[in-house]
Every structure is written in structure tokens, then in C-alpha cells.
Image (cartoon, rainbow, N blue to C red):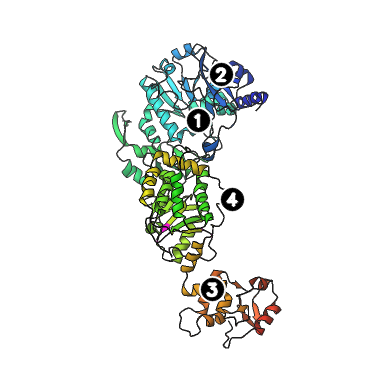
Amino acid sequence: MKALDIQQAMLDDLARSGLTPEDAKILKLKTGHTLKPSTAGYVIPYFDAKGRQTKFYRVRYLETTLTGFAALSGKKPLRYNQPPATLNEIYLPPYIKWSEYLAGKEPLIITEGEKKSALATREGLPTIGLGGVWCFMSKKAGTSLLPALEGVNYKDRVIYICYDSDAATNPDVLMAEATLAKRLIDKGATVMIARIPQRKGRKVGIDDYIAAYSVHKFKRNVLHGNSFEYSASKELHAMNEELVYLRNTGTLYDYIHNMRISPVSFTQHTHSNRWIDMTSVDANGNSKLVRKPAAKLWLEWEHRAELHGMTYDPGQPRITEFGELNTWSGWGVDVAEKGDVSLWHRLLDHLFDNTETEARRWFERWCAYPIQNPGAKMASAVVMWGVTQGTGKTLCGHTLMRLYGDNATEVKDADLQDTRFSWAENKQFVLADDITGQNNRKLANMFKTMITQKTIHVNPKYIASYTIPDRINYLFTSNDPDAFYLDDGDRRFFIHEVVSDQLPESLRKPYVAWSQSKAGIQHLFHYLLNLDLGDFDPQAAALRTEAKSEMTYIGKSELGAWVHRLKTEPETLLNGKQRSDLFTSSELHMLYDPLETKRASPNALAREMKRSGIYRVILKKGGQVRIAGRQMRLYAVRNADRWRTATAKDIEEHYTSTRTLRKEKLK
């Protein structure tokens, strides 16, 4: 960005907060800085109570700072920065004599952000700006309040803490707000919490509100009309740090224990031992101290923490732009570090020995895609099976689980069939270990739905059921060759047979130590985060392998296997004697069961042919095929493409001229 462009971008940024080029001069703002990253931005100098410029400053970036891992993980871009190893300071906009004002007893506002405090102070509401909601203190310096805040006269002074409009729903902001309030009360202040209302569902700060409505309306509607004394509602405010009410389900979410609670359970069980001492005045004017249940009072409190609902959106902020609580807990790895992943490669060498090269490449890209695209729901699942136990199938799954941390879980057959789906809540990756589907068609259909569904309906005990986005990708392991029933045209399952022997101890021990180490999992995270995905398409059909063809065939019934051969090698089954391409199901059934000793009927055969994709002849313009005036259901065992476009006359001539079966049944 050119110098003139940066200057204009700075003025545009100030204008959004109601500040002018003249304000920029008073605040001594300037473009250009020496901090890293060197993205375009402008410098905001700080001032002491006497109006002198200090050595401390912050940079407001005007372009995105996201690169590499941060950009891929959905992390918020860095909007402000300050010199490294510097102690935070409070921002005192140089519009008034702060040394005199801080020593007095007039009301004082504290907010987050320099531009907010500058506009409010300019408009006659002296406001201290913090670089962040926690920037009233310094853990590194061991100070509970910054030195400049320690010098304020708090005795009997009204202090308004006025953060942005999302403060009531953001747990981190609530905690910072409460901590600051307690420390100022200890100093003798009367602390008021001022709530700025949302505007059309968007976050609003002091500057936004004043610029949109005027400072008079801000004083009337926010400072006087929508604020409450912190000490009078201390217990309720403390509960705001722990809980949020979800309007769309009428339930509560407990941040401390990461669980949902029904209002009944909340008031009668989980928080029934919390009380608030209040003064009660009777009709005669006599007062007495009474204890009231905090949970009930909090539910009825107009300032309780509320959100529209709850979602699960990996890589996105804790509170979404739609006013939802995002329960994604973050990756299981804090940092992606480049390093040695040779043990990972050795494990895959072992698991994919004597199989197609493309299968291993596809699997590794399948592993990497949701790491590079947080929250991606792929349309395919992996099945690793092998008769030999201890080959490393489950070990591979456990390694991937470590990348996801709390967002991964391991389940068994019974869990997958639990209709409450409590195991699926807040999960990105599921290792379904030792699956024994036993060629169950119903179970296989359920698995297919789970793999591709966009939402999941969770029905936990004791609270109302609810629906959340389904972000789960599945890795199944099994020791059974018929663990899954697969249709011929299945697109969802990638099947890999592990034919290797048990994992040798010379590999297993160092691999386990590496995969369970902090450095090892950081290295694998970096590797998958930067793996070349090539042409991998998360919504495309899973790579078809020989192992998949084998499991598909093994899983078929006797009738299904016969139909499969009819489709793939019709000449063999027809003995080279049947010249016709077209047959009824009854005619084919006579070939399948000439002695009529089997239980499968012609209708069952027709269903199996339909399932396997054998084409049933239909006229181009619709309607049923008729031969000699009778309706016929014909199947094209050979040359299906020819019969897709054939005329009724061609079909009839071919069929009547090629009948060689002695016993014909028209159906």
C-alpha cells in the first residue's frame, strides 16, 4: 500500500469512529511503523496525565496480518500491536487536563480502545481507553492495576465500565469486566456496568453509538438507562461469567463444566446451593435480611448473559457473528512446528505395504484436508481392516485423535447405534474401532447417512433435544472381511486391507513415544497442515481399491453374488447359448434356480438387479415395453447403452427373435 493510500485508509478508519483529520493531529497519529509484521498501519501514541507523550504506543493495522497456519486455522487477524516486552499503559486522550480530572470526583468511563475513548472524551465524557479488556493489569509485572490507574481518586466516585455490546455474552469479556469491577470497588469506587445495545445484530462500541445517535442519547439510553451497579448484583454477575442462556432452546450452557443444563435442573439441582442476601421491606416499613435462590433470580435478571443459540464451528470465534456460542474447543495442538515425521511415514509404510501407491496418497490427503480446512465435512470415510491384530490400524487412529484433542472420540458398535448420539456432540473426528457390522444392510445405510449428513440431532437425557452442524469425519477399523455391507455403486467408503504382520516392537515403541510427545504431535500437525492436497476433492467419491471390490463381493448374498456375475460376466452365466440381450426376471430366475430349490423369488432377483444397476428397459418417451400386446419388464443384461435409446419396435423384434428358453414366463 502506497503512503498516500495508507494516509487515506487511516482517515477512513478514524471516520468510522466519528473522528476527523483535525482529531488525528490532536492525537498525533502518524502512518508507518517498525513493528513486525510490517503490514500497513498507523501509530497511536500514548500520553500521561499531564498531556506529555510517553514512550509507549500501539499500531493499528489497516491490512490483514494473517499468513500460514493462522490463515488456515481461521484465526482472527491481528488488528493492533505494541512494542515487545513493554508494560501496558492506559490511554488518556489529550482533550482535557487529565491530572486535574483524575484527582476529582466526577464520573469516569473506562472502555476498550483508543478511538472509542477519544471520541467520548472529545464529546464531554472523559473516558479512559484500554488496549484490551484485560489491559488494566499486567501479569508479567505482577500488578493488579496499572500504575496510572492506581493514581486515580476512587473514593465515592462513580466509574462506568462500558465495553462493546457483545460484553454480556462473551465469557472472556465478562470475566475481565468482573475482575476490574472488584478491584475498583476495593479502591472505594461505585462501579456501574453500562450495556450498549446491539444494532441489527452487530457489535457496537461507544464510538459507534455516539456517531450514530449523539452523545446525549448515549448518556440517556446507556449510562443512565441501561446500567446497573456491580456490587448490588455481584453474585448474579459472577454467574454471568459461568453461564449463558440459549434462547432458541430455552436451556443454559455451563462454561465451567462444558455442559448444557435445563432450567429445572439449574434451579433445583446444579445451582440450588447458591444464595443471595437481600434486604426486604414489609408493609410497615420494617426491613430484614432474607436469602433468595441465586439461580431463580439470575433467570429473571434482565442483564443475564444471553445468546441466540449454540453451534459447533471449528476454526471460528467463541461467539459467532450470528450471536451463537461456538463450542469448538480448539485443536489438540497449540503450535505447528516443522520437524521429523519419519515415524509417521514408517507406520504408513507398514499399513500400506503391498497395496496400491495411490491408496496411501489418498489416505494421507484425507487426513490432511480437515486440518487445512477446519470444520470440513468430507463425503467419504476410511475403513481399515485386516485379519491380523496389532498391525497399527488403531494406533494410526489414536495419533489423529491427538491432533483434534477434545474434538475427537473413540466409539464402538453399540455407541454408533445409540440414537441419542451423545457421543457425537462437539466432535470433528471419530475413531470407530473394531467394527463388526456383520454385513448388516440397515447398519450400513445408517453409516452412510452419518458420513454425509450436514446436521446431527442430539437427544441427551434430561434436556430438550437439539440440532447442531455435523463436522465429523470417520475412521473405521475392523478385523472382519465383511464388516460393511457395500453396494456396487458405493461412493462413501474408502476400503483398505492391511495385509502386513503385527507392528514390530522396533517400530511400535519409538512410534508410541513420538506420537505421545508434545514435539512429535506438533511436527505431524505442521506436516499435515502443509501437505500438498493435489486434486483431492472432499466431496468426490472415495478412491476405489481392490480391497473395496473384494469386500463388496464378499458381503453379497448368494443371489447378490449371482447377479454381480451376471452384470460383470454375462457370457459365463448365459453359457454362450442365450443370444438375447433382454430378459424378464422370471427367465433369469430359471437360470439362477433351474431346479427351483432356492428360496429367492423372481421379485427378489428383480430387486437385486435394480440394486446392482442392471438396466431395466424403458421407452425413450416413457411408458412400459409391450410385446404381443402384453406389458413386459425387461432387463438389458448385455449392451445396455443400445437399449437405452431403442424404439419399441426394435425391442420387440429383438426379444421375439431370440427366445431360446423352453419354459417362458411373461411378467
Q: Which residues are magenta?
A: 477-492
For label 3, the crowd category at 10 Å Cα-Cα, with few meaning under 14, some 14 to 19 and many 20 or more, is some
Mark 4 element type:
loop
Mark 4 or 2: in front is 4
In 3D space, how far apart are the residues under numbered discs 1 and 2 (Cα atoms)?
Answer: 19 Å
Q: Mark 2 and mark 4 in contact (Cβ < 8 Å)? A: no
State the residue at coordinates (37%, 35%).
239
Mark 2 or 3: in front is 3
- Mark 4 or mark 3: whose residue is earlier in sequence: 4
The C terminus lies in quadrant: bottom right
- Mark 1 or mark 2: whose residue is earlier in sequence: 2
Mark 1 element type:
loop
Residue 535: which numbered mark, if any?
A: 4
In 3D space, how far apart are the residues under numbered discs 3 and 1 (Cα atoms)?
Answer: 69 Å
Q: Quick one: which residue is furthest to the bottom in this view?
A: 662
In 3D space, how far apart are the residues under numbered discs 4 and 3 (Cα atoms)?
Answer: 33 Å
Q: Nearer the viewer, residue 653 or 146?
A: 653
> With respect to residue 590, does 175 lie above or below?
above
Q: Mark 1 and mark 3 in contact (Cβ < 8 Å)? A: no
In 3D space, how far apart are the residues under numbered discs 4 and 2 (Cα atoms)?
Answer: 57 Å
Residue under label 3, please give it: 565
Instruction: Label the magenta part by its dominant secondary structure.
Output: loop
Mark 3 element type:
helix
Residue under label 2, please give it: 122
Residue under label 1, please give it: 164
- Mark 4 or mark 2: whose residue is earlier in sequence: 2
**Is residue 553 in sight in this rendering?**
yes
Mark 3 or 1: in front is 3
State the residue at coordinates (52%, 60%).
545
